[in-house]
Image (cartoon, helix red, strand yellow):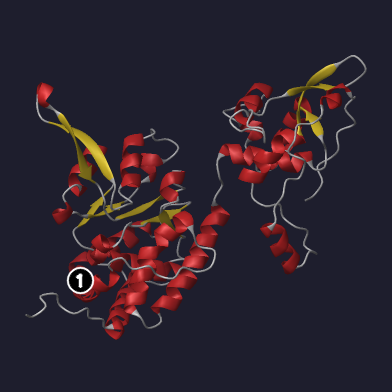
Amino acid sequence: MTDPTPPVTTNTDDGAAVLDAVEAFHRRFNVFPSEAAYTAVVLWDAHTHLLDTFESTPRIAFLSPEPGSGKTRALEIIETLTPRPMLTTDVSPAALFRSVCDPDARPTVLFDEIDTTFGPKAAGNEDLRGLINSGHRRSGVVLRCVGDGNTQTVQPFPVYAALAMGGLGDLPDTIMSRSVIIRMRRRAPNEKVEPYRERIHKAEGHALRERLATWAGTVRQQLEGAWPELPEGISDRPADVWEPLLAVADAAGGHWPKRARAACVQLVTAAKANDKGSIGIRLLTDLREIFGDAERMLSADLLSKLADLDDAPWADLDGKPITARALAKMLGDYVKADNDPIKPRNIKTGSKSSAKGYYAADLADAWLRYCPPRRLPPEESATAATAATAQVRPLFPVADTPEVADTEPLPTPQAATAP
């Protein structure tokens, strides 16, 4: 009896050639900030034709500080290359849900001007953000009530779909962590592109889209359950983001596997460098630098030094300098090594007086868990830097400061020392 299952076919030369052609098409109309960006965009285009072979789909975000940086043009070119594109500048959660819940007619969502939805002047849009985040995984669903009156039942609907975005500034952290970030810039005078004319060039893009779809059909079985080798240091959420793109590159062959891994490392590293973290982590990091080698400091001194920090939000937090109450509230979200919340304590300032302040020992566990490693002095060797990063340890003992310390006068606060 003949096996009805067709043999797995691979044609790495054809795959590499198709991706090369897609890259050349992008280069005619788009100026991306790096070679890594071209690599990532091309692989993202290709992965949209293979969506159901992966457990997750990375979002790709074209972000810039100023308009006129080529974000919309990038989405327009992607629109010609991806299956069932849906380009929009405004969509409600209900509309997006209904658009993507049918796997047989699922669009590639291209969301331009997304800063108007998630920017600082926009409302929270938590429903839309949750839907975008859920749709990152193939198992992602939203729950809706169906039926009439008392006969309604809760039914899950799939929301897995490819999503590309363009906007000013940054996006919510949960979306950023699920995205390949392309930091767009305005073109320099010496950076030339071909003017894009939809009537002329859209058909060329569609021809490339057909080539991508045809090639995808030849490698679909090969990519089912694929586990591409990840570059060293790429794990957790970045691994989820890049696994589909690396799998596509491996299937294409040629120079694409090497390029894909180099792009992965470069863009993940850049994303980490640009990650501002939460306001709480910023506070902990700044406090660590202010404390230096001091064992304890008064709240008043900490507030003064926080407000004096350049490029920090503490002098204008919600329109006014950070207060002792705000400091206590923010630090109260974190705990000490004994799992008790971090709270201000009485610190003796003289023989009969005391004031509220904080002990470094109370903050040490939060510093260890949440703050990035401290920078080493420039004269330290790369070997020493690697060893120090690999063996991060508390700057102070994690046990509570002995109660006798509360009765000792506070020494003159030390200036923050350079780490």
Residue 164, image x, y percentages:
33, 55
Measuring 51% from the left and 66% from the top, which residue is drawn there? 265
**260 with respect to 107 (left or right):** right
Q: Is residue 167 above or below residue 75?
A: above
The quarter in which the N terminus is drawn is bottom left
- Kindly identify the amino acid type of the residue bearing the numbered disc 1: Ala
The quarter of the picture where residue 315 lies is top right
Q: Residue at x 19, y 54 (%)?
A: 106
Q: Quadrant of residue 336?
A: top right
User: Does any portion of residue 100 appear in the rendered image?
Assistant: yes
Label tally: 1
Residue furthest out toward the front: 1
Residue found at the far right of this picture: 351
Seen in the picture, residue 292 relative to 46 is either above or below; the reply is above
Give whichever of 145, 355 is nearer the camera.
145
Image coordinates for residue 213, horizontal then vertical, percent = 20, 71
User: As drawn, is 248 to the left or to the right of 411?
Assistant: left
- In the displayed structure, 188 sits above or below 259; it is above
Outermost bottom residue = 13
Q: Which residue is tagged 1?
A: 213
Q: Quadrant of residue 58?
A: bottom left
Q: Residue furthest top?
A: 352
Instruction: Name the residue located 18 percent from the left edge and 71 percent from the top edge.
Output: 203
Residue 382 x/y as whole percent: 72, 68
The answer to whether 60 appears left or right of 143 in the picture is right
Reply above or below: 211 against 401.
below
Position in image of residue 409 (x %, y %): 90, 24
Whether residue 69 can be seen here: no
Mark 1 Cα within 10 Å, few/some/many (few <14, many 20+)?
some
Label 1 sits on a secondary structure element that is: helix
